[in-house]
Image (tube, grey):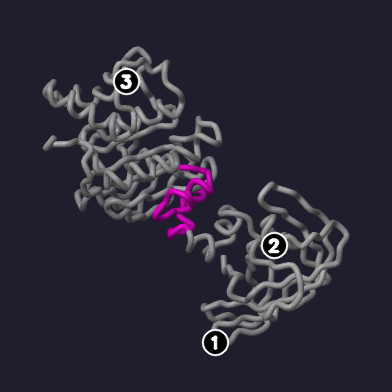
Amino acid sequence: MTSSAVAPHAGAAVRIEDVVRVYGDVQAVNGITLDVAPGEFFTLLGPSGSGKTTTLQLIAGFQTPTAGEIYLDGVRITAVPPFRRGIGVVFQSYALFPHLTVFENIAFPLRIRKTPRAEIRSRVDEALEAVKLAGYGGRQIGQLSGGQQQRVAVARAIVFGARLLLMDEPLGALDARLRKEMQTELKRLQAHLGVTVIYVTHDQEEALVMSDRIAVIRSGRVEQVARPDVMYRAPATRFVAEFIGDANVVTARVEHWELGLATLMAGRGKVTCACSTPLERGQDVTLAIRPEHIVLGAGQHTPNVLKGVIVESYFKGDQTVMLVETETGLRLAVKETNGVTDTCAHVGDAVTLAWRPELATVLLQ
């Protein structure tokens, strides 16, 4: 077919510029600026009430900004009604019509655009094939599993050739196993189509697995925008460090900084960490250390070696998490991969902790 609705094509570029949304006395979105590249899988991540869904609705046109502008491929669309933006949307509830067949659900956006009947048939068939539901067109929505319904919702969103797909917690209603499967499916489909996806979730693991970049949103503001690996290894703020994965977050004071290396007083002892930002002696900072970056046992070539006692231990299948009370007064979580780094340590055992300076992050906010 020469005019495939779901053939690979360039996604749209999106710019959100100083966008504000106020409801009475509540500022749900507070001056957000974001740039999303064509074909990017971009995730808005944050806790409930952070403003991520409101931001998505502003892009879709379901709400109007109190201030700021929204651009699609460089064209201002702030005042353009939703049905003229050409954006596909997938909701958490899927918003499928239970009285219509799978085919009619997917065909709906084409019918309201007065697409010729023959083209509707070909486009719906292509969309069904893209989401691996070929032959399901005649089924009722109630006959489908949750994962299949989610695929129908995606097919309906892409069938009219949308270059931007907005997804609001689309996997929230699925069980844990199916959710993981659909993460892979959605990422595969997005890569195949080449569409731009802006995805909303509160699930940190989901965001890390699926995204090209993540924007962490808190109280209507952007805390950090980065690739998943960069955000995990170098969080910009204390909130990001604690929200993305697990982290030991410690209040510290600067003793010395020189040539990208900082000595900090944390608890009753000193630790060393890499920090490219110049620091002043006496400056209060926050130190973040991932539990898996701390090694049990001596012999590590690092200035960061602390002695302590294991006070708690939790078996989590593939990992064991231990809480260690150090001699300097710090309580640090340590994470070991079972079967790989087992030390056979137990609650009450005296242990030595060590970590490399470059694996700790100094947070200034």
Say which quadrant the C terminus sits in. bottom right
Residue beneath the point at 28% across and 25% down: 106
Of the two numbered discs 3 and 2 on the same chain, state the one appearing first in sequence: 3
For the residue pair 352 and 325, the one nearer the viewer reads as: 352
| Horizontal arrangement in the rendering, residue 41 relative to residue 295 (left or right) | left
Q: Secondary structure at mark 2?
A: loop
Q: Quadrant of residue 107?
A: top left
* Kind of residue at badge 3: Val
Of the two numbered discs 2 and 1 on the same chain, state the one appearing first in sequence: 1
| Horizontal arrangement in the rendering, residue 67 relative to residue 264 (left or right) | left
Q: Whole-percent x and y of residue 55? A: 39, 43
Q: Secondary structure at mark 3?
A: helix
Residue beneath the point at 69% across and 58% down: 335
Q: Which residues fall within the magenta stretch?
A: 201-228
* Kind of residue at badge 1: Leu
| Horizontal arrangement in the rendering, residue 126 relative to residue 303 (left or right) | left
| Placement of 155 over or under 346, stated as above or below | above
Q: Secondary structure at mark 1?
A: loop
| Horizontal arrangement in the rendering, residue 108 relative to residue 334 (left or right) | left
For the residue pair 177 and 264, the one nearer the viewer reads as: 177
Could you tell me how far apart the alpha carbons at marks 3 and 1 are, in whole angstroms? 63 Å
Q: Whole-percent x and y of residue 321? A: 72, 55
Could you tell me how far apart the alpha carbons at marks 3 and 2 are, in whole angstroms? 50 Å
Per the image, the residue denoted by label 2 is 341
Per the image, the residue denoted by label 3 is 102
Q: Which mark is residue 259?
A: 1
* Kind of residue at badge 2: Thr
Q: Nearer the viewer, mark 2 or mark 1?
A: 2
Residue 218 falls inside the magenta stretch:
yes
Could you tell me how far apart the alpha carbons at marks 2 and 1 are, in whole angstroms? 33 Å
Q: Whole-percent x and y of residue 95? A: 38, 24
